[in-house]
Amino acid sequence: MATLVLTTVGAIVGGPIGAGLGAIAGNSIDRMLFAPKGRTGPRLDDLTVQSSAYGLPHPRLYGTTRAAGNVIWSRGLRETAHRSGGGKRSGGRTTTYSYSASFAVAVSARPIAGIGRIWADGKLLRGAGGEMTAEGTVRIYTGGETQAPDPLITAAEGPANAPSYRGLAYVVFEDLQLGDFANRIPNLSFEVVSDAAPPTLGAILNDLAEAAGVRISTGGLSASLPGFAAATNAPLSTWVRSLGELGEMRAIADRHVRLHDESTDTGIVLDDDLIAEGENRHSIARRSGDAPASVTFGYLDIARDYQAGTQRAFRPGAQGREDHSELPVALSAGAAKRAAQTLLQRLWTQRETAEFRLGYRALSLQPGDRLRDRDGRRWEIRRTSLEAMTVALEAEPVNPDGGVDAAADAGRAETGGDAPQGETQFHAFELPPIAGDAPTAPRLWIAAAGTGSGWRRAEIWLSGDAGASWSSIGMASGGVPMGTALSTLPAADPTRWDEIAALDVELLSDAMWLESRPALSVLAGANLALAGDELIQFRSAVPIAPRRFRLSGLLRGRKATEAAMAAHVPGERFVLLETPGLFPIDLSTDAVGTDVAVRVVPPNASVADSPQTVHRVTGRALQPLSPVHGAARVLADGAVAFSWTRRSRTGFGWIDGVDAPLGEERERYAVRCSVGAAAVADEVGEAAWTLAAGAQTAAFGMLPGAVHLEVRQLSAAVGAGAPLSADFILNR
């Protein structure tokens, strides 16, 4: 513990009058230096809870540390309505509301160099590079004497009522989205960089004394601290005592206060020239039963994002109480362990006291000076007096140097990595029904992610009038595993496993991963992905390089996407669809055939500056699937009988072994038979059509030997679906 020796030396040099003057000086210093008793010292809890109260003292921060602040201005909550929906998956057309807040938080009562990371309710809100995990704007004011008022506060309060807060470091949040924080202003804490280099003990105490209006001399206090927070309106003596727990430190009272650390020594040795003649020159007494068996030391652990940590030191074989000490200082686990060991050793060492009687040559010695006895032990003077022409000293032993940092483990903590968000990328596309339901409106899917492993979210904006106006639809979060194809897939049989072809893909970031799955899991729907416009599934995903995978054991043309198998090109999109990060948007049926513009806006980016894509709405989720198993048979009279098998967008599973449900209001097909440019078209209500011989002759001028057939199932909502396209050679 820091030693505060405020006994004056007036009695030594001036007798009773000098003693009186010394008492006056000591009383004056005591009034300047110490507040009335009953006030509590610093605790780690002082730094962890944000507040908003009048008259609350702002902390003085040094080095780099983590601290909460005091909300000094707020404009209240702002409500924004979002309208979306219209389909079965989205639960109909709905209106949701989001909330944001603009406010200012005071951080430090002295200027700072800057703000690093910011946490909200313990989760990372702003990374060291300035990237936000939630939408909102942050402005940092370092407390310089020339800083101007914040423009938002000026606009809200008026130029005459907007203070500059010079000398006060504070942070302004503008329109911070509160959806992740239960629609309230979260408890914020800040990684504050107050000084360019770790400050010394002397520099910290000089600044605290100057703020208190006290002049001190801190010669020798050269030890540095990574970070320290004077977070309460405590007297200067409290900080001297608290910082003294990190090593020996004394305060010597004169008309001013002089502080020095354990490296300061008078170099005086108690030899025959100093020790007075006569008896009782030297005596040592030891107190018993008043030293703890162990000491716990609370601190802010640098390796754990400045969260509160505890290190413990104990004396082997000792029994008794456990002392507790907490200090708002940023340390490594090893340095904190050393502080606990040093404190425990000091408490045990200071059980001893010594009395010395010295000759007149010792008149210059003062409380706080250090001596060495003949055995080499160091003693610190606590009290001096002049008795019978000898100088009587009371002294305590000096604790040995604590040495290097001790080996210690900070323990594990969920710190929330500060990973970059990177560039936001997205795809907008339509799909056949993939989630087991049958949409009742056109559905647009958004897949968004980032090139950085710290990508978290982006807001989706939609425009149906060529960008003249934009609406916020919702938030894409979590990130969808996606990237690009490095190779191309050849056409294959969609009815069986493709064990020959493989697809190499490269994902956007190191945080994304693809996994192999058992065949039964794949058959049950696992590992469904969009490659170009084809839906595929894969059984094996083998990493071949950072962010690169080779996919094999493929199922092709899934969900009736066989037509896209022949259209693959290198560099086309790859999106894993088996993820909750996909964002569906149900549109109006009136949007079919029109263009929709989409923008995905990451935090701290504007809508106007974000890239956009334009998608032509086809209503694919509502389109009937292409029929399969087309067949042609020449009848005896020369007519050709065509047949096919329909597929249902509501019956992919085929779970009962009978015909799939229709999925449309009625069964209708558009058929077209052609030879070259000549064609015959018709519409039928069953999965069969007969083209009479006369109709063939009328259309083609003969009975053809080969024909091309297209069959499309019809929908009342969006018209014809994808075609069955087949060529037949007619054996006549």
Image: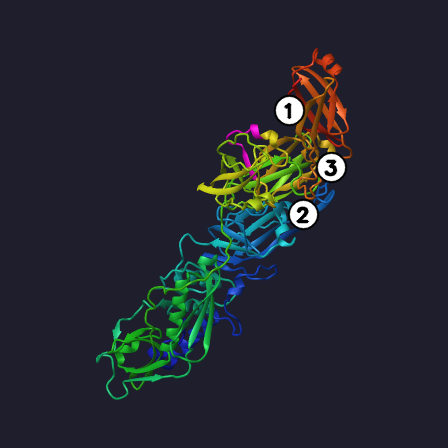
Picture coordinates of residue 23 (x, y %)?
42, 77
State whether residue 179 appears in this view.
yes
Instruction: Please give the name of the residue rendered at 35% of the width and 75% of the height, measured from the top-left corner.
Output: 367
Q: Quadrant of residue 723?
A: top right
Q: Nearer the viewer, residue 306 or 77?
A: 306
Q: Quadrant of residue 531?
A: top right
Marks 2 and 1, the one that precedes in the sequence: 2
Q: Amino acid at mark 1?
A: Ala
Which stretch did the figure color magenta?
565-575
Mark identifier at residue 726: 1
Image height of 612 relative to 520, above or below: above
Q: Nearer the viewer, residue 212 or 328?
A: 328
Q: Secondary structure at mark 3?
A: loop
The label nearer to you, 1 versus 3, is 1
User: Which residue is disc 3 drawn over?
Assistant: 663
Picture coordinates of residue 582 (x, y %)?
61, 42
**In which quadrant of the rendered image does the C terminus lie?**
top right
Please tell me how crowded label 3 is: few (under 14), some (14-19), or many (20+) other residues with Cα within 10 Å.
some
User: Which residue is disc 2 drawn over?
Assistant: 98
Instruction: Please give the name of the residue rendered at 64% of the width and 31% of the height, measured from the top-left corner.
Output: 615
Q: Amino acid at mark 2?
A: Ser
- Asked whether 571 falls inside the magenta stretch, the response is yes
Q: Amino acid at mark 3?
A: Gly
Q: Secondary structure at mark 2?
A: strand
Q: Is residue 718 left or right of residue 404?
A: right
The label nearer to you, 3 versus 2, is 3
